[in-house]
Image: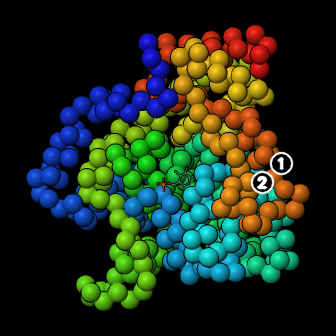
Amino acid sequence: MSIAFIDLQAQRRALGSKVDEAIARVLDRGDFIQGQEVREFESALATFTSAAHVVTCANGTDALTLVAMAEGLGAGDAVFVPAFTFVATAEAFSLLGMTPYFVDVDPNTFNMDVNSLKAGIADAKALGLSPRMVVPVDLFGQPADYTAIAPVAKQENMILVADAAQGLGASLHGKQVGTLADYTTTSFFPAKPLGCYGDGGAVLCADADKAALIRSLTQHGKGTEKYDNVRVGLNSRLDTLQAAILLEKLKIYEGELAARDAVANRYKDALKDVCETPRLLSGATSSWAQYTLKVTNRDAMQSALKAAGVPTAVYYPMPLNRQGGYRDCPLVPGGVPVSEALASQVLSLPMHAYLDAASQDVICNAVAQTMKSGSV
Ligand SMILES: *Cc1c(COP(=O)(O)O)cnc(C)c1O
């Protein structure tokens, strides 16, 4: 038996001929750019998340850049991001000349720590930066603590952007990801919980004017006349084939989320007395983009699991403040000790909606045996 880290082939079997048929329809029509499935998918995703407006774009990184462009941000503007995330959360803003400011995360949820954010805001002002935006990340599928962060953003007159590249389908206190911030951005990269077969992304928001502005920005700053480009934009579109694929995948997403949750619960039952398993905020559900343990001797655990046929991955081995392109960005006073520690401890286990109980037994036994053997 071979265990997959993420099993896209099992998902393809579950979809049957649906995706192939959807692709064939687009090939037959030939409307590869801005074809009918693009709008259909936007409207289906708006219904699914309860977001008022959905504008698709080329990827989750562009989605973040588009939001900052729509808000007119640039040089001298500080955007607060967690140090423990994928690089895109900072990169999207560096590209516009903004200053990513790194704050620390909570050791239990791995998501933005509101106290670190508050310390960062005060320091950024002292540095002469304008605090304009805060971007909590729904890391590994769990919504950030928007209940704590939103009032801080409001008080400071900052735009709140949820980087939900990993968190689509999760919720906090009964509110869906997509409605928890001024803007929500997401990614349809194949390995994300809702992935397409290439690149894709979207911005979700409540404000109709901002949604229209972002749509213009995705199409070279297009105005109402076809060749009158009224602002500087990007070429950032979700293509029709990907939208057609996503429409089919969205139809089974609710069921997949339930299956992911069942997988997470089985992991928890088997591993909670063995090692440190993920913790959710009270009132939070997760889309379980990753199931991530904290282990002290990670290298030993990873090789023991590999020997037992269990694939694992490290998200992320280095906090952003240590990475070459971001070393000069400001860092919260006292640094980001939690992000630094997590970077050396986190280990993600196989996680997908089609992971069967027998495979999970193999995985959990291998983790337990390794812990017991004392090698970690
Ligand atoms: C994947 C990811 C992104 C970027 O998405 P792309 O579609 O790959 O550009 C941004 N933020 C986080 C947290 C991600 O995991």
The label nearer to you, 1 versus 2, is 1
Within-10-Å neighbours for mark 2: few <14, some 14–19, many 20+: many
Q: Position of residue 56 (x, y in %)?
A: 38, 62
Q: Quadrant of residue 36?
A: bottom left
Q: Quadrant of residue 73?
A: bottom right
User: 357 above or below 194?
Assistant: above
Q: Position of residue 221 (x, y in %)?
A: 39, 81
Circle 1: element type = helix
Examine the rendering and report whether any part of residue 148 can be seen: no
- For the point 39% across and 55% down, the residue is 200
- For the point 42% across and 86% down, the residue is 231
Within-10-Å neighbours for mark 1: few <14, some 14–19, many 20+: few
Q: Position of residue 284 (x, y in %)?
A: 63, 43
Q: Residue furthest right?
A: 334
* Amino acid at dot 1: Pro
Circle 2: element type = loop
- Identify the disc placed on residue 356: none
Q: Which residue is mark 1?
A: 337
Q: Position of residue 79 (x, y in %)?
A: 68, 69
Examine the rendering and report whether any part of residue 69 can be seen: yes
Q: Residue furthest front?
A: 324
Q: Is residue 259 left or right of residue 22?
A: right
- For the point 47% across and 20% down, the residue is 3
Q: Are marks 1 and 2 in contact (CB under 8 Å)?
A: yes
Q: Which residue is mark 2?
A: 104
- For the point 58% across and 28% down, the residue is 312
Q: Quadrant of residue 274?
A: top right
Q: Closer to the N terminus: mark 1 or mark 2?
A: 2
